[in-house]
Amino acid sequence: MLRDIRELTDDPEEYAAELRRRWGGLLSYRYIGRSYAQMDLGPEDNTVTVRRDMRDGAGGLLLAVLGIASPEGGHMSDLEAVPNPVIHSCQILDPGVGVERIEIVSEEIKRGRQMGYSRSKIVDADHPARVLALTEGQGISIGTPPAGLQKMAANPLEIADSPALPPLWEVFGARLRSDGRWALPELSVDVASPDAALHIGPQFVTLEAAAVQRAAELTGTTRLHGVSSHVMFVARGKAGPFRVETEPLMGAPGAVAVRVVMHDEGCDDRVTTVGSYLFRRAD
């Protein structure tokens, strides 16, 4: 089992060292190329360069990429809190076909003693008048770090765009099991948040992969754009494997929804995450 960083609160030096290790090794932000001024040293950069592996079957942006790029939990950084997500939603105005870079324009709504609320507007970084998506989120602090933590050197991954890039679900370790369910393996350090729980990144990626597969089965095409997503984080994923159950629902012509539920099989099969995804056939 991974160690929960909250166990080190009384040792500021060890806490800081562990946070550097965990933040520097976390796959989610490093793999999509997202930096955060609240955490990383260097100039502020709220853009993400889009690669082929960040697109859906019709060339639009994956909902998971937008979610990782704008987690929107009330702007709680790991330097001032031990944050956990509660709710995240995304609404697509423009699927982003042909967009090469996105920019996340984030806005803090409210910060309370424990709860935080924020939202963002995601635009084409090269043509900011082209608004792609709106995201909103709620987060909670489950602990208080020791005072005096400092920003850290970024540890980005340099990934060249290529047709040979694996799909994001493969990078994060997800797979379609022989029982027909999508699942993530047991919790590992590269996909765990500092509090030793499954990070939102692999959850977003796996939930969307499961939803897309069921939507494609129902519609008979993989040329689907995400329209919206709504995800509720019910409990912290602590062990794994993490199994996804799906319920596809056909709507008006060209529209399909998929409800998803993630279970932690290593913790009495408890529900960790619940969400819904809406897709539409691409023109």
Image (cartoon, rainbow, N blue to C red):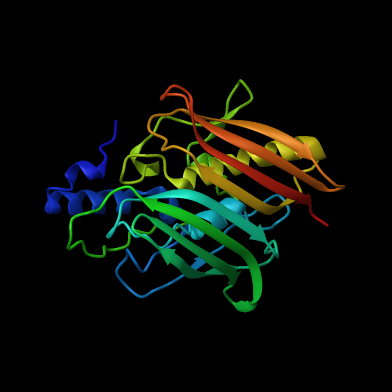
Q: What is the quadrant of the C terminus in the image?
A: bottom right
User: Farthest front residue?
Assistant: 113
The reply, left or right, for residue 189 in relation to residue 55 is left
The residue at 64%/43% (across/down) is 276
Q: Is residue 195 above or below residue 120?
A: above
* Residue 161 visible, this orientation: no
Residue 280, position as x, y percentages in the image: 77, 51
The one nearer the camera, 73 or 44, is 73
Q: Is residue 254 above or below residue 134?
A: above
* Circle count: 0
Residue 34: tell me if it is visible: yes
Q: Would you say 241 lies left or right of 92 here?
A: left
Of 2 and 77, which appears nearest the observer?
A: 77
Residue 91 locus on image (x, y percent): 65, 59
Residue found 43% across the figure and 29% down from its top? 240
In the picture, which quadrant includes the N terminus?
top left
Residue 41 x, y percent position in the rendering: 29, 69
Residue 114, picture quadrant: bottom left
Residue 29 x %, y %: 43, 55
Question: Residue at horizontal 45%, vertical 57%?
Answer: 73
Rendered residue at 73%/43% (across/down)? 257
Q: Determine whether 253 is above or below 35 in the image.
A: above
